[in-house]
Structures are given as structure tokens and as C-alpha cells.
Amino acid sequence: MATNRIGVLTSGGDCAGLNAVIRAVTKRAITEYGWEVYGINDGSHGLLDRPPRYQQLSLSDFSGTVLRLGGTILGSVNSGDPFDFLMPDGSHQDRSEEIIEGYNQLGLDALIAIGGDGSLAILRKLAQQGGWNLIGIPKTIDNDVDLTENAVGYLTAVDVATEALDRLQPTAASHNRVMILEVMGRDHGHIAINAGIAGGADAILIPEIPYDLDRLSTKLEDIRKQEGRTFALIVVAEGVKPVSDSAEAGIGQYLCDRLTDMAGAECRVTVLGHTQRGGIPTPRDRLFGSAFGVHAVDLIAAEKFDRMVAWSSRDCVDVPLADVVGHSHPVDPKSAVVRTARGLGICLGD
């Protein structure tokens, strides 16, 4: 197969490190292979417009600050399933053939898609329907894409959450308060457990480990009795469910209200939300993003398609996309990171 023109897009929620990937794809494709690189705007939505929305990327686009920027210079979307697309009148339509037509109008020989498990599943389905040559690159701050140790954006999110704990600890100590930090993690608790350990949390709650409010209350009492300390730090992933089904507040506020009643603690809640997605990417997110981008381009040159680039055993590898989509990577309750938390005396709620 003769390759002359490749596309690259970012799909799903934004995160730090995406621009490092786009930069690496562009530099490798142009300098090593002499290909044209088309950046598709706003994920697959850019292929719905007529003409398709894109920008041809050049080396001069990456001579300055792009490597250091958060977000994505191409734009992204995390809504609008092309196979069940919500229309302005409230109806749903299958618009997959429109996206495939947009791809064909650009005359692309292959596509590099940077996305999480949901985005990669949809794009793989489009690729199979349209006969695209597809390479996937994992990105998600939740780090729950299967078969890779790291996804782009995750390490920056952990840094942001850890820094928040570093800032909350002095004010907790100054006012004898329990500070509850709610972090992202709709289904899995990788950010919470890793930032919690790094930031010296006293308790960490994640979706993978059921919790008991009495255990949390006892932990706060133990801190007072055994350490003579009148403040504490608790980290909770947003996906942890309240014990009461009738709870209307987020999990952070729910815990605050319950622990105030049960333990007589003065609690405050901080919800990090989208601050974990933004900001300057850490060096390691830039490194992984760069390695993923280079490897993805080399896979196209080798005509190895329907693959996802991954990080495993200190090396950049690739795995079948078919083995990734439809799966996830939860926190293993028996993993080293959980054993570390328990070894430090951190309460995990069980």
C-alpha cells in the first residue's frame, strides 16, 4: 500500500498531553516518510461537515509552545454517537455513512485516532464499515483503557490531584478539619488511589472496593486517639456510590454530611472536576504521548492496522484493537498500589 496522506483526530474528553501526540505524529510522518498530515477538527464531527473541517499540519505548526499546551489544538467532542446521532428535532439517526464519506473526501490512506475506550470502540466500528486503516492511541485521565499501563493525560491528572492534597493539608491542620477531595473516576479509582497515596491521605474510597461509613468514622476517631491529630484528608472517586440511594448531593458532599453527623467532624469538600483535565502536561505525559505518536506512524508504514499503541513493561508496544474495545482496566484490589495503601494504614473503607 502506498501511503501519502494520513489523518489524526482527538475524540472524547480532552486531557493534557494530546498536543504532544499530534506533534509526534506530524514530525514523524513528515520527516521520516514525507507524508501529508491532516488534523481533523472536533473528532468525527469534523467529518460530518461539508466540506470536512480539517487543517493540514506542518512542521512549523510545532516550532513553539504546542508541546506544552493542555487540551487539543484540533478540538474534540465527547457526545454524538454517529450510529445513534441526536438531531436538533430530538430524533436519532445513523450518520455513520456521512462520516465515512467525509473521510473519503479527504483522500486519507490511514487514520490515527486518539481516544478512550468508548471513542476507540466507535471509531473502530466506523473503520470496519468504511474500510479505513486505523491505529488507536489511548488517552483518558481515568487510565482505564485495557492492555496499557498508561494512557495520555492520566499522569497529569494525578499530579493535579496530589497538588490539591498538598494545598489542603495545611488548611486542614490550621482549622482542625476533615478535608474531602472528590476527584474524577466515574467507573474506576486510579486517580484517587494513586494521588491519595502520594498526597498522604488518611482514607481513600474507590468504586472497586465497597466501603462502610462506620469504618471511616472509626478511622477519624483512631487518628485523634492514636496520633493526637485533629485533622484528616479523605480522597474519593466521583463514581463511588452513596450508601443511601436517596442521596442527591455528589459523593464528596454526601460523605461530608454523614461524617459530620457520625463523627462530629468539621468537614469541607473540594471537587476538582475539570481542573484535572487542564493545565500544562507533565513531562511523563509528554514523553508517553510522543512515544505513542511515533509508534503509531511507524505502524502505518509497516501496514499493521487495527492496532492500538500501548505502554507495557517499560516499552512502547501495540496490541489488537479488538482486544481493547469492550473491556476496561479497573483498580485491582490485590494490586501493589492497594497493598501499599493498606500497608500505610490508609483506610479504604472496607
Image (cartoon, rainbow, N blue to C red):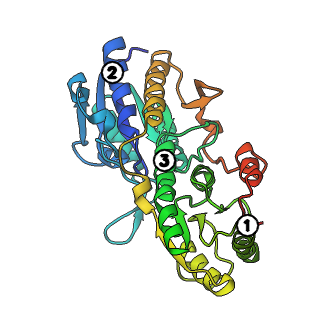
Earlier along the polypeptide chain: callout 1 or callout 3? 3
| Mark 3 crowd level (few <14, some 14–19, many ≥20, 10 Å Cα) | some
Residue 46 point in image, percent of width and height: 30, 46
Which label sits on residue 159? Answer: 3
Residue 150 quadrant: top right
Residue 197 lies, with reference to residue 175, above or below; the image says: above
Q: Nearer the viewer, residue 232 or 189?
A: 232
Which label sits on residue 27? Answer: 2
Q: Check if mark 3's residue and mark 2's residue have beta carbons within 8 Å.
A: no
Which label sits on residue 349? Answer: 1
| Mark 2 crowd level (few <14, some 14–19, many ≥20, 10 Å Cα) | many
- Mark 1–mark 3 distance (CA, rounded to whole Å): 24 Å
Q: Residue at x 61, y 83 (%)?
A: 260
Residue 200 point in image, percent of width and height: 61, 55
- Mark 3–mark 2 distance (CA, rounded to whole Å): 28 Å
At label 2, which amino acid type do we have? Lys
Q: Of discs 2 and 1, which sits in the foreground?
A: 1
Q: Which secondary structure lies at badge 3?
A: helix
Q: Which secondary structure lies at badge 1?
A: loop
Residue 255 quadrant: bottom right
Q: Residue at x 32, y 37 (%)?
A: 68
On the question of residue 66 being in view, the answer is yes
